[in-house]
Image (cartoon, rainbow, N blue to C red):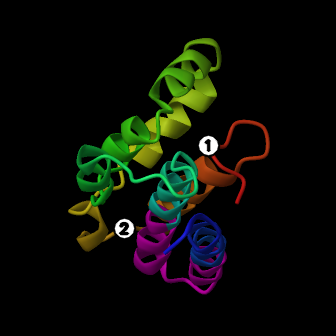
Amino acid sequence: MNRKELQSLARVRLAEARALLDAGFPDGAYYLAGYAAECALKACIAKQTRRFDFPSKKTVDSSHTHNLKSLIEVAKLEAARAARAAIDPVFGEHWEIVQGWSEQSRYETHDIHDAGELLLALTDRKYGVWHG
């Protein structure tokens, strides 16, 4: 899967999450919203690989995870995330919500509030971590 495919998949999963939330299915919305964030971060990682370059084994191995905090580090976005969170507390709170999504949490029950909060944390026009 390449960067453009990951970007497209992230947008589709985010739209599906919104549709599920609107239809009253918060568990599916929560799962897909987090999956959208995962795909977006993996697209950022893919962007780091230049055409015809062979990525390091460590980068490849580290990219095969559902852990958003790890993916942020592999995508080399942690310093930028921390810097913005330091001056923008709402953005920092949004990242905390997004990083709460995990391989384990996607199997837990989530209500409308949890799913809506995760979607807002991702898409808020001013403070969201990603606009999709």
Q: Residue at x 46, y 41 (%)?
A: 75
Q: Residue at x 60, y 74 (%)?
A: 5
Q: Is residue 78 magenta?
A: no
Frontmost residue, 67 versus 50:
50
Which mark sits nearer the N-terminus, 1 or 2? 2
Q: Position of residue 54 (x, y in %)?
A: 40, 54
Q: Is residue 33 magenta?
A: yes
Left or right of 17 on screen, residue 110: left
Q: How far is disc 1 from disc 2 in space, using C-alphas?
A: 21 Å
Vertical placement of 94 versus 40: above or below?
above
Q: Residue furthest right?
A: 125
**Pointer 1 with pointer 2, Cβ within 8 A:** no
Vertical placement of 32 versus 58: above or below?
below
Pointer 2: what residue?
A: 110
Q: Residue at x 48, y 75 (%)?
A: 1
Q: Residue at x 58, y 75 (%)?
A: 9
Under circle 1, the secondary element is loop
Pointer 1: what residue?
A: 129
Judged by its main secondary structure, the magenta piece is: helix
Q: Position of residue 66 (x, y in %)?
A: 30, 60
Label 1 neighbourhood size at 10 Å, few (<14), some (14-19), many (20+)?
A: some
Q: Position of residue 106 (x, y in %)?
A: 30, 68
Frontmost residue, 64 versus 28:
64
Indicate the amino acid at tag 1.
Val
Q: Quadrant of the C terminus?
A: bottom right
Q: Which residues are magenta?
A: 15-35
Indicate the amino acid at tag 2.
His
Under circle 2, the secondary element is loop
Label 2 neighbourhood size at 10 Å, few (<14), some (14-19), many (20+)?
A: some
